[in-house]
Image (cartoon, rainbow, N blue to C red):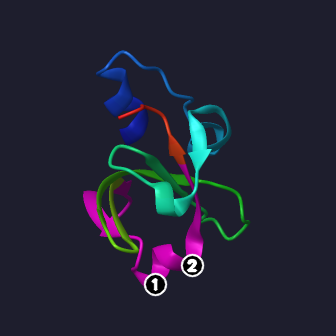
Amino acid sequence: GLMFATYKHIDMTLPRSSGSMAVGAGVRVDRDQAQKGDLIFFTTNGRGSVNHVGMITEINGDEIKFIHSSVQAGVIISSSEEPYYKRRFVQINRVIEN
């Protein structure tokens, strides 16, 4: 919902679910080509399918920081290097050309 609402503010309509965004929003880019504003996708349901999305806010070497909505803590910034997200990373999509 956070990414859907965020992009709605700039008059872009994304698919409603993170899984649909992964296949239908923007173009997939390699991790080493990631930029601020790109969407980053994870599988957190234990089934291997995309079910979580965030927006990249910072890149520092191999570490990618992203803003996302968490069930327990609300809207937060996390790191791709945290073990939980490192194991669950799936892909990055570029929706807006910078």
Return the residue at label 1: 83
- Identify the secondary structure beneath mark 2: helix
User: Residue 25: percent from the left, percent from the top?
Assistant: 57, 33
Q: Residues within 10 Å of mark 1 (few under 14, many from 20)?
A: few
User: Residue 62: percent from the left, percent from the top?
Assistant: 40, 74
Give the left or right position of residue 25, taking residue 67 as reference.
Answer: right
Give the left or right position of residue 54, taking residue 92 as reference.
Answer: left
What's the magenta region? 69-92
Residue shown at 64%/45% (left/top)? Answer: 19
- Identify the secondary structure beneath mark 1: helix
CA distance separating discs 1 and 2: 6 Å
Rendered image quadrant of residue 75: bottom left
CB within 8 Å, label 1 to label 2: yes
Amino acid type indicated by mark 1 = Pro
The question of residue 90 being in magenta is answered with yes
Residue shown at 61%/45% (left/top)? Answer: 28
Return the residue at label 2: 87
Residue shown at 54%/45% (left/top)? Answer: 93
Q: Quadrant of the N terminus?
A: top left
User: Residue 88: percent from the left, percent from the top?
Assistant: 57, 71
Q: Quadrant of the C terminus?
A: top left
Check the image and name the residue furthest to the top: 11
